[in-house]
Amino acid sequence: MNIAQTKKAIRCHILNHQRMSILGGISPTSQLWIDFTQRQQEILSAFALEPTSQNRRTLFRYPFTCAINPKKFPQEELTNKLIIKLLMTWAFNGSKEIFFREGAVKFGTTKDKATFILKNLLRKAEQQLNS
């Protein structure tokens, strides 16, 4: 797999993870789960990384912070629903910008998340080669 194909596979992996999160989980025999696990192994093998739990976690780690502080809002059901909607929108659709907020980086779009994960995997593969 070349870099462009790997980045595309990572984006598909992120989207499948989002689908499973929205569904609240899926059956281990479903096609979505089979595709999800196969893609995980393909991505890790592209970097010559073992499919350990630590390496698989790398596929889900990217900095994400949200500008909403629920403690500042009145505790009303409508407000809670709006906060949840905004969090889902930012988490799954992302924003168009990358910015710093209180020392944390917000990576908004799926493309940005895929780029960040790709860089982490490249770093891990390089560390493994050096050791």
Image (cartoon, helix red, strand yellow):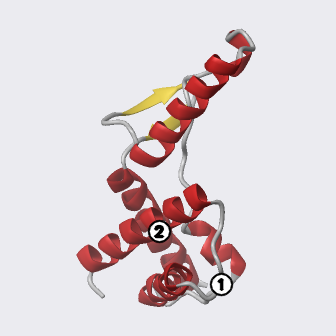
Please indicate, yes or no, whether residue 61 appears anywhere in the rendered image.
Answer: no
What is the distance, in whole Å, between disc 2 and disc 1 at their CAs? 14 Å
Please indicate, yes or no, whether residue 87 appears anywhere in the rendered image.
Answer: yes
State left or right for residue 17 relative to residue 28. Answer: left
Q: Position of residue 63 (x, y in %)?
A: 55, 46
> Does residue 65 sit above or below 72 in this rendering?
below
> Does residue 40 sit above or below 59 in this rendering?
below
Indicate which disc residue 36 carries: none
Compare marks 2 and 1 and give the one earlier in the sequence.
Answer: 2
Q: Position of residue 122 (x, y in %)?
A: 44, 73
In what quadrant of the picture does the N terminus appear?
A: bottom left
> Does residue 82 sit above or below 45 in this rendering?
above
Q: Position of residue 113 (x, y in %)?
A: 42, 54
Residue under label 2, please give it.
16
Q: Residue at x 33, y 55 (%)?
A: 111
State left or right for residue 52 relative to residue 97. Answer: right
Tell which of 20 and 111 is nearer to you.
20
Q: Residue at x 54, y 24 (%)?
A: 67
> Does residue 125 sit above or below 70 in this rendering?
below
State left or right for residue 17 relative to residue 113. Answer: right
Q: Residue at x 45, y 71 (%)?
A: 13
Residue under label 1, please give it.
28
Q: Position of residue 72 (x, y in %)?
A: 69, 10
How many numbered marks are there? Answer: 2
Camera-near label (2 vs 1) is 1
Q: What amino acid does circle 1 point to?
A: Pro
